[in-house]
Each structure stands twice: as structure tokens, then as C-alpha cells.
Amino acid sequence: MKLRPEEEADLNFILAPIKNDDRVQNMRNYIQHGKISTYDHVESVTRLSYWINKRLHLGGDEKVLTIGAFLHDYYLYDWHYTDGGHGLHGFSHSNTAMNNAVSHFGIGKRTQSVIESHMWPLNLTKVPRSREAWIVCLADKFISTKETIMCR
């Protein structure tokens, strides 16, 4: 999954204001799967989502897709420690990430939907309802599985 130079430039242009934020950089301090940081995880999901959209000519809105993918796990805590009230992380973190993204970056409803539904089918009622949401949901499953298997 290699992106072309112009695609890299597009991703960097869309994400520059978000990636440079100190709160986003703080995601480097949290482990997602195995030894992979939350920041590296969302970057991988973003790149795969963008690649799928482009290579399969799916026509998803690149800005909604890219920002939704990058902020899908923007929950800002270490989910491995359940004493902070994060015991049901799998069920609750998508709402936490969405609320943080709205609060910190003012994202729109379509991007909110991408973040909120990325844990389907674990969250049965949060079915992806857009092309962008389906792409991110599937890319997240693929990357999460790869990270979990490769880190064991």
C-alpha cells in the first residue's frame, strides 16, 4: 500500500493543522496494540483508508475520510488501565474520540459519523452510514488485526 507523492502531499495538507496539535502528538504516549502507539495506529488506518478510496475509485470525500480516520481513536487515555473508568473501552471510546474531536477541532456531522461508527459491529447500533465510514471501519479492522498479530 504505497501512496504516490501527490497523495502524500494531499494527506499532509488535510492533516497538517491536526497533526501539529499538542493533544494529537500526545497520542504517541499511549499504546494501542502490542507496541504500536495510538498515533501510529491512526496514521496507518488513515493511509489505508485513503489508499482504498483512491485505488478502488470509491469516491469518498477525502477530507471527511482522512480526518475521520485520523481522529477515530482520539480518546486521549491509556485504555489498558481500567481504573480510570475505561473498563468498557471497546464500547465507549468511539464516543469519547468523537466528543474530543468536536471539542478540539470542530469537526462536522459527517466526520463525527465516521468516528462514531468505526467500532461496528461491536457497537451494534452504530452502523456505518456513509462510504467514508465503511472504508474507515474496514481499514481499522484490517490494521488492528495486523498490529495485534504482528506484535505477538
Image (tube, rainbow, N blue to C red):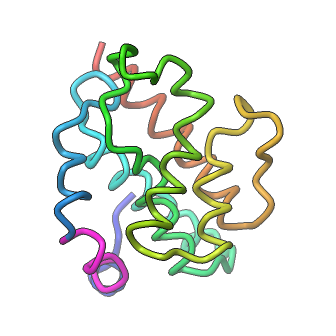
Query: Which quadrant is the N terminus positioned in?
Result: bottom left
Residue 149 placement, left or right of 50: left
Residue 1 placement, left or right of 62: left
Q: Quadrant of residue 98?
A: bottom right
Residue at (46, 70) in percent of width and height? 67
User: In terms of depth relative to the viewer, which is nearer, 79 or 144?
Assistant: 79
Query: Which quadrant is the C terminus positioned in?
Result: top left
User: In terms of depth relative to the viewer, which is nearer, 86 or 148?
Assistant: 86
User: In terms of depth relative to the viewer, which is nearer, 82 or 126?
Assistant: 82
Residue 9 placement (x, y as % from top left) = 28, 84
The vertical placement of 76 against 63, above or below, is: above
User: In terms of depth relative to the viewer, which is nearer, 119 or 44?
Assistant: 119
Q: Magenta residues: mostly which secondary structure?
A: helix
Residue 149 placement (x, y as % from top left) = 39, 20
Residue at (40, 15) in percent of width and height? 82
Which residues lie in the magenta part?
11-20
Q: Quadrant of residue 37?
A: top left
- How many numbered badges does the structure rendering display? 0
Residue at (24, 35) in percent of width and height? 30
Residue 71 placement, left or right of 108: left
Residue 137 placement (x, y as % from top left) = 62, 48
Residue at (52, 56) in percent of width and height? 99
The vertical placement of 84 against 139, above or below, is: above
Residue 44 placement (x, y as % from top left) = 36, 51
Q: Is residue 42 magenta?
A: no
